[in-house]
Image (cartoon, rainbow, N blue to C red):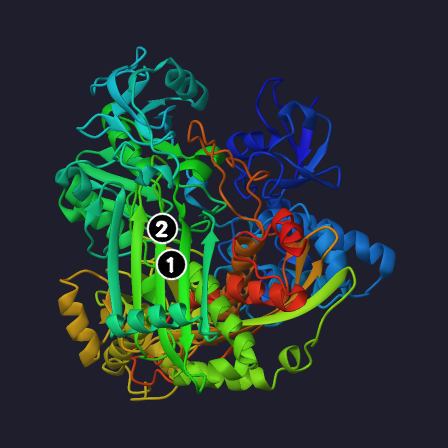
Amino acid sequence: MDLEVNGSPSAAPAEGEETAAAYIRDRLGLTGTKTACGTGVCGACTVLVDGSPTVSCLLPADRLAGRSVTTVEGLGGSHPVQRAFAAHDGLQCGYCTPGFVVEAAAFTDAWRAEHGDVRPDREAIADALAGHLCRCGAYEGIFAAVAAACAGDFDGDPGQDPPRADAPDKVTGRARFTVDHTPRGCWEGVIVRSTVAHARVRSIDAGGARTQAEPGTAPVLVDLLGSDRTVRYAGQPIAAVAAPTAARARAAAEAVRVDYEVLPAALDPATALEPDAPVLYPTRAERRAAPTYAEGVALPSAWNGNLRGPFTLGWRGGTAVRRLRAAERSGDPRLVTREYTTSAQLHTALEPHACVADWDDGHLTLHVSTQAVSETADTVAGRWGLPRERVRVVTEYVGGGFGAKGILSTETVAAVELSRIAGAPVRVALTRAEELTDAGYRPATRTRVALLADQRGDLAAMSVDSHGYGGVSHGSMTAVLAALMYGRTPRRTRDYDVVTHHPPGSPFRAPGGPPMAFALEQAVDEMAERLGEDPLSLRRRWDGNTRRAALYEKVAALPLWTARPRGERTGRFRRGVGLAASNWLFIVSPRSQVELVVENGVIVVRSATQDIGTGIRTVLRDVVAERLGTPADALRVEIGDSASVHGAGATGSRSTNSMGPAAAEAADALRVALRERSDRVPAEGPVPEVGLKEALAAAEGVRVVGGRPLDRWERMSSLLAGGGDMAMGRGLIGGVHVMEVEVDTLLGRVRPRRCWAGIAAGRIYAERLARNQCEGAVVQGVGYALFEGRRDDPATGAVLTANMEDYRIPGPGDVPETEVYFHEEGFEHVPGGGVGLGEVSTVGVAAALANAVHDATGWRPTDLPIRPDRLLEGLR
Ligand code: MOS
């Protein structure tokens, strides 16, 4: 029996193993329907089947026979919910958006049929969308969008462009992600991974796959093991195979036989430091080649067996230690010491790591889901010995990154190698299990903090010792961030890594920040309690940062803070409010460039940067439009193609502060070029419409390039960075979070109710999008605080939380109602006046939440996540 898809008849799917999602995407080419978790948890693959929202990743395709199916494409782009999502910015990367939109459309229609134009409350919407997950955390916008659509606010054209330039493409399913890209004749690649934690690989039997370039359609295999033939974690890539179909590739992967000489593994960080523990990197050469999860460069440190470190920083560290020891000996009540642990957090971007590689006559074209288009092209050219202009990296849309898609990773290496010997384009996309096993994570930490106050209650000494647990990788930078908090009183910070036979970590949004704040900010609260002082007033005294001072001032007048419950709380449900300060570094990308080209009377804005959901496409559009005073529709932004000029990578919170000023410079250069062609273009101020038209008509083909102007400090730092694209700017970025929770003391559940996020990152470029990012940072911080934690099999090292049911990220019903406040002063010395906010906005969230739990219950959470069992144990 045939079926109907978006109103048109379609041939019935054959009986078999194919899912409805695969049928819709691969056979019908309707790639608006996304797959992410593959287990019916995330809702990205939701379609309407006979009008009912249905997850298509679990539904056998043949069950669609005789049904009427509506995908996001079938909504046509004019459903009020789609306009509402765009107008309220209920999206970031856009990967989960089609699923949300389809579900929300069905909900809105049903709600309005039943209730008319009544606005549903937050809870009703959360219930309706409970089967959907957005890792970017765009829930605030989603709540607002659905409520507004139900109330009829978007029945007509809103008469205003949405704040996000690519929102229309994302709410309609038109936006094409790497996994949506299947060139004709594309083969599928599969990675063969180690089943043991530590072994020498004696041999790899290709199982009939060919390993040399020769014509044919037989499966191909490439070896991915390094020259030391050693695997150091379960899940480590050993080889990759490709075949013309996914089924054949999977069969070929299963035919591969690996002969292991199994070696003892160090799986537990505690025993890894014992004298007889197997040492991961016994030689200097191996230690040098060890992977790092530091973003940029790892801190220099010495090794001792499986321990790396300490990297020590501080001011008058000797004095600090002396004072702390004396205080300990004398039992000084103004000494606060405690140890805190955090768990490994998985990035869980909904679009997996994916690459489609295609060699053609010595030219290599890659579609990659990456946070760094320019850097990927540079790295690929270097690695495969190609002139840079023969490498093209294309990344139109990226379904989330959060730090894990910053470097050249296995799927890209595998796809490039496989394509070369297959003589065909090859796609390698990680499965969800692979993504949750070997795509990086925020390493677990153990951090000991000691704070000492003097007679006046001033900070007299601080020490922070932190161990990072990044499996086979190192790069912990937790304690060092504490050195930058609370002035310059004597302090010592030490960072260590313990390496074990587990998968490598990778940078994750403000690496080291959240565990630092979780420890330090709770210690500060404990000190406040010890001194009998309000936690806000103590921070105002201790914290010399003027930008954060402005945020504290705001908090002092915030009802969420001033009207918080006081005194002992009783009963089953207890409310509490906590706060935390945070910092982050200001990093800039000195090589950033933007080109403007006049094509067919339109200004095309180009750069080899990429939008991972943070909104750089919009920033480029808005900066150029504002600078020239032209309407936004006189411009077209084209990013995500390495053929253009160098663009900033979306790492280190540097895209906007780097690309924004480059775009402004390009706009100024274009104005000069246009003035030469029309005297109706003024030297400054808005270009009138007639003048623009005339000038553009005469300027066809004109091209100008703008770069990131550097101030003196940045120029120096850029020189020190040795031509790398990350330089340190002047000034620290600051944040203050206030969180209200309700603790269920019977079941041990913590419900975050409200959050205030104060961010001091200078001038804000695209307000709604910036706010969205900060709201999402709260969502990710809540996940880190309450649920997220990778679990491993202690016997084999295999990752157990390898699906999205066992690894739980926050859904719409888990997050607090969030208000974002921007303090925009304090970075006037920076070109463009604004710095980064993607990372600082998540640093203090878990810390504020933990302080709120303590405020509610009197119990201090020292271990993340704050699981119900831990909370109940603590309250006993
Ligand atoms: Mo990096 S954690 O993507 O700034």
Is residue 390 visible in the rendered image? The answer is no
Of 532 and 220, the residue lying toward us? 532
The one nearer the camera, 410 or 297, is 297
User: Total number of numbered labels?
Assistant: 2
Would you name the residue on which mark 2 appears? 468
In this view, the residue farthest toward the right is 114
Q: Position of residue 268 (x, y in %)?
A: 39, 37
Q: Nearer the viewer, residue 620 or 123?
A: 123
Q: SS of the residue at dot 1?
A: loop
Residue 533, percent across and down?
Answer: 55, 82
241 to the left or right of 124: left
The amino acid beneath tag 2 is: Gly
State how far apart marks 1 and 2 are (Cα).
9 Å
Callout 1: 10 Å neighbours few (<14), some, many (20+)? Answer: many
Which residue matches tag 1? Answer: 512
> Where ligand 1 lies, by image quadrant?
bottom left
N-terminal-most mark, 1 or 2: 2
Q: Seen in the image, is 87 located left or right of residue 575?
A: left
Q: Residue furthest top?
A: 208
Asked whether disc 1 touches disc 2, contact meaning CB atoms under 8 Å apart, the reply is yes
**Quadrant in which residue 9 is drawn:** top right
Kindly identify the residue that appears in the image at 24 percent across and 81 percent down. Answer: 672
Evaluate whether residue 523 shows in this view.
yes
Q: Look at the image and tell me in which quarter the N terminus lies.
A: top right
Taking 318 as reference, is 331 left or right? right
